Amino acid sequence: MKADKSLLTGSATLLVLSLLSREDKYGYQMIAELEAKSDHTFTMKEGTLYPILHTLEKEGAVCSYEKAAPTGRTRKYYHITKKGLRLLDTKKEEWTIFSQAVNAILAGSDPALA
Amino acid sequence: MKADKSLLTGSATLLVLSLLSREDKYGYQMIAELEAKSDHTFTMKEGTLYPILHTLEKEGAVCSYEKAAPTGRTRKYYHITKKGLRLLDTKKEEWTIFSQAVNAILAGSDPALA
DNA sequence: TGACATACCTCGACTCTCTAGGTATAATAT
DNA sequence: ATATTATACCTAGAGAGTCGAGGTATGTCA
């Protein structure tokens, strides 16, 4: 994690839902994709991801199914539900409002440091 | 707080330092300014702000002094130090990297929902 | 004089992420 | 053959950060 990891708080679920909105994925894959797509800014730990997935499943935002990989290994895929898509929409908007608010505050700070 | 409050985690210190980079301020004032400048997105609680200010002071990022308000009341003003300005710079960059990374992930999500 | 806004502070609860373990299988190296 | 590494999943407890709810005190206004 390049940036202060505590910044991740509150966005982890948003990121997971966003990944799943394109196609079904399994846990290990999501971690790798987050790392790659964020240019190594996010290194989401397994201890963070798996509990999030389990919570989302309990809430009905995602559902899971097992599928064998070409290698023969069993993977647990997650699929986002309609409820999950609505949740994603809500969290996306929250993120937008939040980040714009932070930028508004920062815009007021000493320009000599920009 | 309009947005999920857990998003604030990790940015609270950045916001405080940013406010102080323009001019010295006292606690109660910072809460009001954050609320106003962020269009009511941030409602930083006193239980959040004061411990942050005390920690920053311990670290030498800010220093404080008492000053009487025109009303006669005593206010505790905080002044950002050079060390604090460097910390602000660091945290600003962390925020930029982080928010760009989140946006990169979101950009990959289902465009039909955008 | 009572109510309210200002102004500061702290403690314990809560939420979220991470550390550090654990299990098991497949691929690769020795 | 066998050891090691990568894959793939999981959980319990620790730690960090914020909040709720309380406390104290002063100034203003009805």
Image (cartoon, coloured by chain):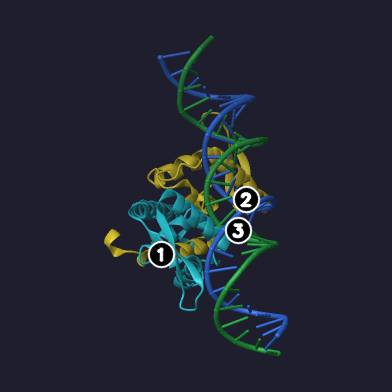
Chain colours: A cyan, B yellow, C green, D blue
Q: Which of the two discs, 2 and 3, sits closer to the camera?
A: 2
> Which one is nearer the viewer's eye here, A102 or B67?
A102
Query: How far apart are labels 3 and 1 at the CA level?
Result: 41 Å
Secondary structure category for the residue under label 1: helix
Mark 1 and mark 3 in contact (Cβ < 8 Å)? no
> Which residue is identified by label 1?
A19
User: Residue A18 at x, y = what percent?
Assistant: 39, 61
> Which residue is identified by label 3?
B82
Which chain is mark 3 on? B
Name the residue type under label 3. Lys
User: Residue B75 at x, y = what percent?
Assistant: 57, 36
Residue depicted at x 59% and y 41%: B50
Q: Which of the two discs, 2 and 1, sits closer to the camera?
A: 1
Residue depicted at x 46% and y 50%: A58
Secondary structure category for the residue under label 2: helix
> Which residue is identified by label 2?
B56
Q: Residues within 10 Å of mark 3 (few under 14, many from 20)?
A: few
Which chain is mark 1 on? A
In the picture, the quarter occupied by the N terminus of chain B is top left
Q: Residues within 10 Å of mark 2 (few under 14, many from 20)?
A: some
> Which one is nearer the viewer's eye here, D3 or D25?
D3
Query: How far apart are labels 2 and 3 at the CA level?
Result: 12 Å
Using residue D3 as the reference point, say whether residue C16 is left or right of it. Answer: left
Among numbered discs 2 and 3, the one appearing first in the sequence: 2
Which chain is mark 2 on? B
> Which one is nearer the viewer's eye here, A12 or B84?
A12
User: Residue D18 at x, y = what percent?
Assistant: 53, 45
Name the residue type under label 1. Leu
Q: Which of the two discs, 3 and 1, sits closer to the camera?
A: 1
The residue at the far left in this view is B112
Residue depicted at x 61% and y 43%: B51
